[in-house]
Image: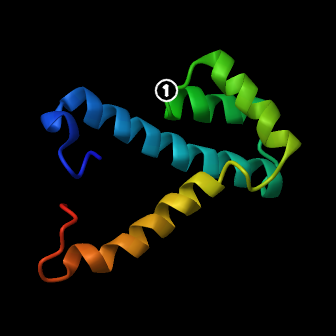
Amino acid sequence: MKDADYLNGDPLFKLTVLKMRLRSVTNTLLDIGIHTEGMTRDEAMELMMQGAFQQEREAAGKWVRANLSSVQLLSYFTGYEEHRELRAPRQSGAGARISR
């Protein structure tokens, strides 16, 4: 929607979109860190709160959620990247209707 100039390029909307992308990447790092690298709760909280501007309550809930399941949090990033890959040929094609 941001690429289609939703809300006439409103900078607050663009910032919201960027924050959601940051959250997606952070979720991926969190999931991988916990399940493959022994990330501690303190490290996870710092990543989420300092690195991704999440509130303490949200970060604490996500810590619990990430420990109860694996790969679910990183699926948001994977899905977004797959969507971008599917969309790329259409964007670059002649007469494409999808705006950049």
Quarter of image, res 17: top left
Question: What residue lies at 23% left-to-right and 72% top-to-bottom?
Answer: 91
Quadrant location, the C terminus: bottom left
Task: Name the side, left or right, on which 48 lies relative to 41.
Answer: left
- The residue identified by callout 1 is 53
Type of amino acid at the residue the image marks with label 1:
Phe
Residue nearest the viewer, comparing 44 with 27: 27
The structure residue drawn at horizontal position 32% and vertical position 74%, both measured from the top left corner, is 88
Where is 32 relative to 41, above or below? below
Residue placed at 62% from the left, 52% from the top? 28
Which residue is farthest right?
Answer: 68
Q: Position of residue 40 (x, y in %)?
A: 79, 37
**Which of the 4 image quadrants contains residue 5?**
top left
**Is residue 4 in view?**
yes
Return the x and y of residue 89 as percentages of the image width and height.
Answer: 30, 80
Could one spot residue 40 in this view of the protein? Answer: no
Seen at 70% across and 35% down, the residue is: 43
Taking 79 as reference, is 90 left or right? Answer: left
Q: Which SS class for mark 1? A: loop
Front residue of 39/87: it is: 87
